[in-house]
Amino acid sequence: MSANEPGERPADAAGDDAGAGASGASTEAAGPEPPRRRFLLRRRPVIFYGWWVVLSGTAIMALMGAFSYYGMGVFFNSIKDDLGWSAAALGAALSLARIQGGVLAPGVGFLIDRYGSQKLVLIGVVLSGLGFILLGQTMSVVYFYIIFVFLVQGGVSAGMGNAPMAAVTNWFYRRRATAHGVMNLGLSFGGILALPLAWIIEAWGWRQALVFAGATIWVVGIPLSFVIRHRPEDYGYLPDGDKPEDRGGEGDFPGAEAPAEVEYSPWEAMKTLAFWSIALMFSARHFVTGSVALFLIPLLEERGMSLADAAGVLSLMALIGTPGRVGFAWLGDRYDKRLVIGFCFAFQSVGIIGFTALGGNIGILFFLILYSPTYSGVLPLIPAIQADYFGREWFATIRGLMTPVATASVVLGPIVVAGIRDWT
């Protein structure tokens, strides 16, 4: 088994699907007949509708970042101290949520590819909002586990990550990494919102803050879900806003490698080394970054910072990382994505080592400068490089199949780090 270049089909799959692939390519080039019942397209708009999909995905990712990815780190000590739980007990709940996400990911990915992103985004927003509201009533570990794992994380898994990501992948080709980079700005905005979330916790308490989080997800997320559209061809568009006669040209960036738009089935993808390499890369990243996001605030509090100041560092990390999401994605559309990803991983490692070795404000500054832009920069490149290798047709399903591989490593992060905190 060899590592195929982006767009290169494995030898055992190329022959079987040659005829079907040629037919599919011809159909896609012409584009399907635009539907009669159409409200998106009366005339070709000035702004390509794909960018509205990106902006809606950005806001949805901001909700996920503010209240789930970064937000749980803000809530962590308040919940732990008020209810008298250990860090390991609370960290285990977060790990169980990741296990649930990994187990359900292949099925959720198939549903996205089968029924479209919009339906799954709406379901995810409703479930996660309800989950946060019910978390505000937490009195026991079992209750917290059930609500957080099945409602909060279930909603995030269903519609607040993979679904908008699949939609953006479908709407873009030449600018795919850049589009993902813009959408992933939402996670940075979510991290910036960690500071006002900390103020709400200090002013109202963590229970009221959780209810506020759930209500905000509903008020903002439900209307945005109706902006998401799964495929441009369903509305008379082609990716990047191209006309049919534009397809097959050199594109805007002739200096970059532009892989042919081949389509792998999930089974074909799993037989390639590229599939497992991307899955392990995805896993390694989240093992580290998930633990940093969860435990950075508790660690800074233990070093003498107030909750608000520690949340400010987290917000600053997200703010400094903002240019990295778009900047490294922009580079990924022009140069080999593998080299850009390797560069980012190297600087993340140096930033974490510097934070630990230097300590104090110098260590924090060193960490923010090196870690923040590069950890942010990798995120949009992973789905973009997946689509380069395996195409758009089964994007969500293939990503869902990668997720359990990543989850096996991701789950260990909070448990290992929480155990070290409790034992040292």
Image: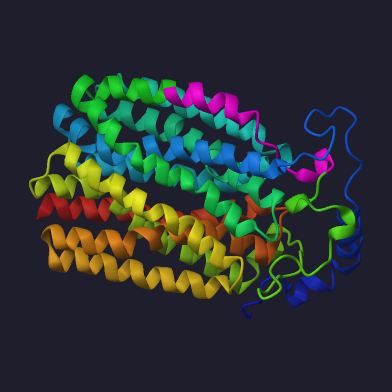
Q: Residue at x 46, y 29 (%)?
A: 128
Nearer-the-camera pick, 14 or 120 = 120
Residue 24 locus on image (x, y percent): 87, 58
Q: Is residue 27 left or right of residue 155?
A: right
Give the residue displayed 40% in from the left and 57% down from the top.
286
Quarter in which the N terminus is drawn: bottom right
Task: Give percent across and percent down for residue 268.
Answer: 71, 65
370 vs 158: above or below: below
Quadrant of the image occupied by residue 197 = top left
Q: Quadrant of residue 260?
A: bottom right
Can residue 401 be seen here? The reply is yes
- Please name whichever residue, 148 or 309, is drawn nearer the observer in this view of the structure: 309
The region drawn magenta spans: 216-236
The C terminus, quarter of image: bottom left
Residue at point 13%, 44% (across, down): 301
Locate residue 384 relative to residue 304 in the image: left or right.
right
Between 300 and 410, the one lying in front of the other is: 300
Direction from residue 24 to residue 164 in the image, left or right: left
How many labels, in total?
0
Q: Is residue 88 visible?
A: no
Q: In x, y percent, where is residue 187?
A: 43, 45
Q: Main secondary structure of the magenta part?
A: helix
Q: Nearer the viewer, residue 160 or 413?
A: 160
Residue at horizontal 14 percent and vertical 67 percent from the top: 358
